[in-house]
């Protein structure tokens, strides 16, 4: 047997085998695409049988061979229509032309005029070229396994074109006819195999073609539960499922117990679907098994319009279930049914199971975060209560002891003059208690962001001067450095409280004598204030936490410097709720400077200038 014959027999055997496979598939599952594929492969198979029966020259069989060959472009157009969309007029034109050519071939026999041969050639070239372009375009539009299948179909179409080119050359150049015929047989072999792999890839190859996208999705799956919200997770799962199945769209419907519906889409475009046995999605959810439908609109005519709008002709749906809890449904859909294969049901269920794991992990993370948040709230409450109880106890103890003393004295000698010093001590402790209680209340308001009330024109220089006058002592003179009024629109009471807190701290944390300096000035679009003291300073490790609630420097202790660690927290709240910024520069053992910057609202700048 010569090499040419080997190629020919191999090509014939391949076509017959492929036909048997696709014919069996069409019988098992008589969908339009399967029937079209079987019809397409029946043409070369019949040509092979005719060639085996008798050499097709001049006989009726030779006309039949020509007709079968000419039917190939038409069947190709039908297959393009199964996988993409062919305009109806083009489909009809190809049918009419094929019918005319068949009739003409039979009627004219071997006496075909030139114009008829031209029509034949035109039909061949135009429809074969259309087939190639359509599959190339479809492969560019699709992704994953579908892209690979469409590339294979495009390669098959190119090889089919070559079959006709080489056959033509064999006739045109008889000296090399043997070579052209062998090349034509090789091209036909390549075409048959490529079409077979493109139209009905064996399960093993299909899996291999799906693997890169599936692997990429599963690789990402572990990190999905940590995405910021469920919507982002669902979007990732949808794109992963669509890519793995080579389909253009996928959608996750989350089950809402309250609405008794599956919710598809994001917040603004959310669509609620009540699961019924009518729809594939409903059946998948109710029966808890994967479902495939080649025509979702026909399945559920009530919502046919909406289904078509989303381009969902063929649809795969699988339930997302975790530990018996129905979480939702994963749907993957495509405008053409042959994009999917029956064994894709197993894959879509696998992806739905993966989605269940991801959603469950997310729920667990949410639960853990919730528990942690609750623990934090409990801890803060405990901190708050113990700090409050601790700080309130000292003035209360003094208060109780002092009033008991006054009472005993009054009982013992009712006519004795009032103990003014004792009463003043009671008042001082009561004031201290009041300050502590107010601080606790303000800390709560700071948390709630409702510290700042009505705003009015406030002169920061005046505030600094009043505060300094109240807090300055011989040991700690308080000086104000300012060139004039510095006016802004602020909550006056809170501004007083802010400066008071900073100056009080400056005095309190400067046990040695020293000057406290308050500077007030205006920059282009903001007012600035700083309070500098020559005190104990703040250790570097405390600096990042000094404005946190209840935080006290590691260099201070309750006996020497009384306090709750709330003052700076409230100061920060006041400044930030005015839209400003507060920070500190400090060197332990050498003193601190607290800086405050507050915005000036438009119009205020003019007031400052005057
Ligand atoms: P309190 O003074 O009641 O402790 P604050 O919130 O006002 O609470 O201050 C928090 C901590 O910041 C103080 O405990 C102290 O360690 C440190 N601190 C605040 N102001 C000064 C300052 N001027 N000099 C040094 N340390 C300071």
Image (cartoon, helix red, strand yellow):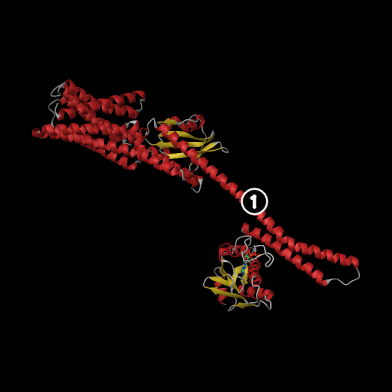
Which quadrant of the view contains residue 138?
top left
| Residue drawn at (52%, 43%) of the image | 362
The residue lying furthest to the top in this view is 53
Side of 303 where 579 appears, left or right? right
Q: In the image, residue 433 lies at what x, y percent?
A: 73, 63
> Where ligand 1 lies, by quadrant?
bottom right
Location of residue 407 in the rendering, given as x and y in whole percent from the top left corner? 86, 65
Residue lying at the far left of the rendered structure: 175
Which part of the image, by quadrant, shows the N terminus? top left
**Which part of the image, by quadrant, shows the C terminus?**
bottom right
The number of callouts visible is 1
Where is mark 1, residue-wise? 378
Is residue 231 found left or right of 463 in the rendered image? left
Where disc 1 sits, the SS reads: helix
Instruction: Locate residue 431, reporting x and y percent.
Output: 74, 66
Q: Is residue 57 above or below residue 455?
A: above
**Residue 123 visible, this orientation:** no
Q: Is residue 251 above or below residue 480?
A: above
């Amino acid at each position: 047997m010569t090499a040419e014959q080997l190629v020919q027999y191999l090509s014939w055997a391949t076509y017959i085998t492929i036909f048997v496979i696709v014919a069996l598939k069409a019988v098992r599952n008589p969908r339009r695409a399967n029937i079209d594929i079987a019809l397409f492969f029946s043409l070369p198979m019949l040509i092979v049988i005719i060639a085996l029966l008798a050499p097709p020259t001049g006989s009726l069989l030779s006309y039949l061979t020509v007709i079968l060959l000419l039917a190939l472009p038409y069947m190709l157009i039908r297959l393009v229509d199964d996988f993409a969309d062919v305009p109806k007029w083009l489909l009809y034109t190809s049918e009419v032309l094929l019918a005319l050519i068949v009739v003409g071939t039979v009627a004219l026999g071997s006496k075909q005029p030139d114009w008829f041969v031209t029509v034949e050639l035109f039909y061949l070239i135009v429809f074969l070229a259309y087939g190639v372009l359509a599959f190339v375009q479809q492969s560019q539009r699709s992704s994953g396994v579908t892209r690979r299948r469409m590339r294979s179909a495009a390669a098959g179409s190119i090889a089919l074109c070559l079959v006709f080119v080489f056959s033509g050359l064999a006739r045109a150049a008889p000296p090399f006819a043997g070579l052209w015929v062998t090349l034509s047989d090789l091209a036909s072999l390549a075409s048959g195999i490529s079409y077979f792999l493109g139209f009905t890839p064996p399960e093993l190859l299909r899996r291999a073609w799906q693997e890169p996208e599936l692997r990429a999705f599963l690789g990402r799956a572990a990190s999905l539960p940590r995405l910021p919200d469920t919507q982002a997770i669902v979007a990732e799962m949808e794109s992963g499922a669509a890519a793995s199945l080579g389909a253009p769209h996928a959608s996750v419907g989350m089950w809402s117990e309250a609405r008794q519906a599956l919710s598809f889409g994001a917040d603004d475009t959310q669509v609620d679907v009540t699961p019924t046995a009518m729809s594939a999605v409903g059946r998948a959810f109710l029966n808890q098994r994967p479902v495939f439908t080649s025509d979702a609109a026909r399945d559920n005519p009530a919502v046919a319009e909406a289904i078509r709008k989303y381009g969902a002709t063929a649809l795969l749906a699988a339930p997302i279930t975790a530990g018996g809890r129905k979480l939702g449904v994963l749907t993957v859909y495509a405008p053409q049914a042959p994009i999917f294969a029956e064994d894709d049901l197993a894959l879509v269920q696998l992806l739905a199971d993966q989605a269940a794991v991801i959603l469950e992990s997310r729920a667990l993370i949410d639960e853990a975060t919730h528990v942690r948040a609750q623990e934090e709230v409990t801890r803060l409450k405990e901190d708050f209560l113990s700090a409050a109880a601790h700080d309130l106890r000292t003035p209360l103890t003094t208060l109780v002891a002092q009033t008991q003393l006054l009472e005993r004295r009054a009982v013992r000698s009712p006519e004795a003059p009032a103990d003014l010093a004792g009463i003043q001590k009671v008042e001082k402790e009561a004031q201290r208690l009041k300050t502590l209680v107010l601080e606790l209340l303000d800390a709560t308001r700071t948390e709630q962001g409702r510290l700042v009330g009505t705003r009015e024109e406030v002169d920061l220089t005046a505030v600094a001067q009043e505060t300094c006058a109240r807090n300055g002592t011989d040991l700690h003179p308080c000086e104000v450095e300012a060139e004039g009024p510095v006016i802004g629109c602020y909550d006056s009471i809170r501004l007083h409280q802010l400066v008071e807190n900073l100056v009080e701290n400056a005095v309190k944390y400067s046990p040695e004598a020293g000057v406290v300096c308050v500077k007030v000035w205006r920059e282009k679009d903001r007012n600035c204030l700083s309070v500098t003291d020559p005190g104990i300073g703040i250790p570097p490790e405390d600096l990042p936490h000094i404005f946190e609630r209840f935080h006290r420097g590691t260099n201070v202790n309750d006996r020497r410097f009384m306090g709750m660690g709330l003052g700076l927290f409230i100061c920060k709240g006041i400044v930030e709720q005015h839209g400003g910024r507060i920070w500190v520069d400090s060197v332990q053992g050498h003193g601190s400077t607290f800086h405050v910057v507050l915005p000036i609202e438009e119009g205020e700048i003019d007031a400052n200038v005057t």
